[in-house]
Image (cartoon, rainbow, N blue to C red):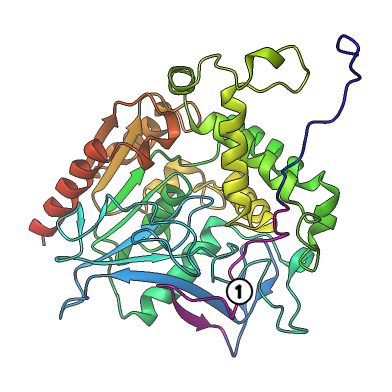
Amino acid sequence: MVGDRPLQRPPVTATPLPASSAWSEGDPPASRKFATFCEDRRFALEGGGSLGPITVAYETWGELDATASNAILVCHALTGDAHAAGPSGPGQPTAGWWNDMIGPAKPLDTNRYFVVCPNVLGSCQGTTGPASPHPDDGRPYGSRFPVVSIRDIVRSQALLADHLQVAHWLSVVGGSMGGMQVLEWGVMFPDRVRSLAVIASAASASALQIGWSQAGRLAIAQDPGWNNGDYYDAPDGEGPDQGLMLARRIAQIHYRSDESLDNRFGRDVVHSAQQFDLWSRFQIENYLDHHGRKLARRFDANSYMVLNKAMDLHDIGRGRGGVAAAFRRVECPVLVVSIDSDGLYTPRQQEEIRDQLQSNGILVDFETIESIHGHDGFLIEFDQLGPMVERFITETEKKG
């Protein structure tokens, strides 16, 4: 009891949320383009099993030049998608997540470069994932969708590069999970990349990252609406939206720093007169609820599970004799960017990347973003990140 009031469960979202907010055929395509592969064969997965056919949704900006030498691949993070730049609209609920980086006269200048961003394998915004129709019966894959790895994602991107007639990327750029893809490009396809830009990422997932990831997956799995991954026919409000919202709350806390959250919210409350009620609200709680609802309106719980696991499995040394041996495959210049307040992908992990590459004689530009915003700094501090990336790619171009 609290005073004379019984303990109760917290209130749930007033407006029922969809069981899944995955993009599906029949929805407006927005700026998406689609390429389908492996129609007459299977796409083998690193961990066993296969998929086929697979569709990759992607967006492009700018034009490929006559020598196909100006293409830049942008790799998105866990809950990102192909819409790295551009406005929101029908079929595209949010504006581009890297709007300040991609466009005319921006760091990834679309007057000069052909910029490509694919939605990753296993995601939910047009690329084959758990919400996609299974070729055997047309019903969503759901629980039948296999575990995929960062290497599987990169191999699907290589198919897209072939489709676009891009033999070599001028640069492959990405942060967080996107940075994992960048590193795998350098290790898997060293002859297809002229430079790499790895931002707030790691050569392998750390114990801290894996621990936080498990908490997020369990939040979804313990929602009765998840139904072991088979929830796509559930009505609004009866899918795993509460679990997905909780997973996002957990993530949002460690995406930001203590200083960032404290400066913004401190101990501010919503209704001070009710502060001794068990479910009275601090402003930080409203913020976390907002981000949980926002994700549930544009993402899919199964995709969160699959990609979150792919991040945990990330280890460029697996099957290659260890991290040091894997880094010896990288042949091109690398930009490594750290965020000084990042408590999730800590600076020591980017320092490890730098040190391993430099020990192999690779030219490394190491930069640090000074920010109070923690891991999310790569989505916020464009005034620092933009010049770093622009300068690095310009130098790559000059070297021919």
Q: Which residues are magenta?
A: 16-38
227 horizontally vs 397: left or right: right
Does 168 sit above or below residue 357?
A: below
Determine the residue positioned at 27% across, 38% down.
358
Quadrant holding the C terminus: bottom left
In the picture of the structure, the residue carrying the numbered disc 1 is: 24
The spot of residue 226 in percent (x, y) is 80, 54
Choose between 21 and 333: the one closer to the eye.
Answer: 21
The spot of residue 97 in percent (x, y) is 39, 52
SS assignment for the magenta stretch, majority: loop
The spot of residue 345 in percent (x, y) is 47, 33
Camera sees residue 313: no
Amino acid type assigned to the residue bearing label 1 in the image? Ser
57 horizontally vs 20: left or right: left
Does 333 sit above or below residue 351?
A: below
Determine the residue positioned at 44% across, 33% down.
375
Residue sitting at the far bottom: 40
Helix, strand or loop at mark 1: loop
Choose between 10 and 314: the one closer to the eye.
Answer: 10
Q: Callout 1: 10 Å neighbours few (<14), some, many (20+)?
A: some
Q: In the image, is residue 19 part of the stretch drawn in magenta?
A: yes
Determine the residue positioned at 48% across, 23% down.
261
The spot of residue 157 in percent (x, y) is 44, 68
Residue sitting at the far top: 3
Choose between 254 and 398: the one closer to the eye.
Answer: 254
Which corner quadrant of the image does residue 25 belong to? bottom right
